[in-house]
Image: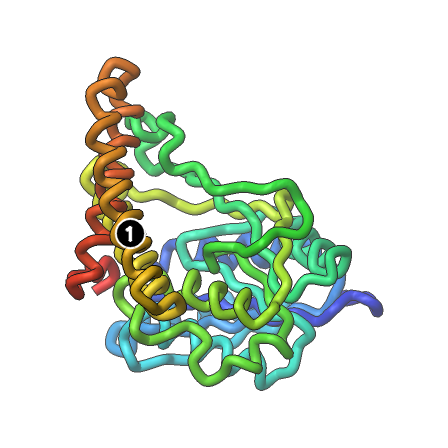
Amino acid sequence: MSQPGWPAVTLCIPTFRRPQGLRKLLEHVGRLTYRGKLSVLVVENDAEERAGEAVVRTVMRAFPFPLTCIVEPRRGQTYAYNRAFAGACGSKPDYVAVLDDDEYPEPGWLTAMIEAAVANRADIVGGPVFPVFEDSGHWLSASGLYEPRRYPSGRVDMIYGAGNMLIRRDVLAHYLDEPFSNAFAFTGGSDFDFFTRCRRDGRSFAWADEARVRETVPRSRTSVAWLLRRGFRNGTDRTRIDRRFARGTGRTMRRWLKGVGLMAYGMASLPLAVFRGRCAAVGSLIEAARGAGRIAAEFGIIYEEYR
């Protein structure tokens, strides 16, 4: 039962062809120990097969919190996110939270997020997402290359991913109907673009390092090739966002210098990195891939990872 004094939260879960992941996520959401009012909104982004919608129907009756599923027929992750945000804002909770359908939270996750938001008077809160490898014996699983960016709990300049996020509903409503730009629908990076806009608008951020979420890393992502593609994509994201918010000749030169610098650093450090082991060598290659992505985006070349 919810207790007075704890804010009301709507948890948004976009899903696309991950029914097993969604089921696991909902099982863990059902174990949350949050003492306030919580509702869950799933947005199915596969209007043809609707496997996620079927999962919601099977767990709905026994689910401990109000659970709703709506279908967003326009393909692309930003369309699913934005449909979820619009639906959540319409029910007027105090906060809106987000988890992805390949993640699952610890029982105290939402409590820790709310406590960080209230204690720091923050508009937006993020937390760490730890990898859990399907192929736990693969050498990359112990490489540290998948480990999340982390900070001490408290105020931060900005967060960088929406996979573990909480935002005040009145702040989110200010950006409707398109908080996550649909220009990033198949590339990723819409969350970083959104947080950059929020920071420019004077919104405040906090980090809740105790609000821990796990992310399943499939075998298809446990490879050097995937890490390099992700590095390239991250580079293109940074250039695209920099171009939106930092115009002018000086800013253009700095973008090019960053791209060239990352490529040069990655390649120059590679020979020494090889002697430190394959993890270090892959780290150097990722830096070079990020630089290549930055330069590629200057020519309109992007990698649509989610197409």
**Residue 168 visible in rendering:** yes
125 up-or-down from 40: above or below: above
Could you tell me which residue is drawn at 43 percent across and 61 percent down?
192
Image quadrant holding the C terminus, namely bottom left
196 up-or-down from 149: above or below: below
The kind of residue on which mark 1 rests is: Gly
The residue sitting at the top extreme is 275
Which SS class for mark 1? Answer: helix
Q: Nearer the viewer, residue 289 or 71?
A: 289
The residue sitting at the right extreme is 4
Could you tell me which residue is drawn at 33 percent across and 68 percent down?
248
- Provide the residue designation for mark 1: 235
Q: Nearer the viewer, residue 243 or 212?
A: 243
Could you tell me which residue is drawn at 38 percent across and 38 percent down?
146
Task: Classify 10 Å Cα crowding around label 1: few (below 14), some (14-19), many (20 and above).
Answer: many
Q: How many marks?
A: 1
**Residue 164 spot, x, y in % from top left:** 52, 55
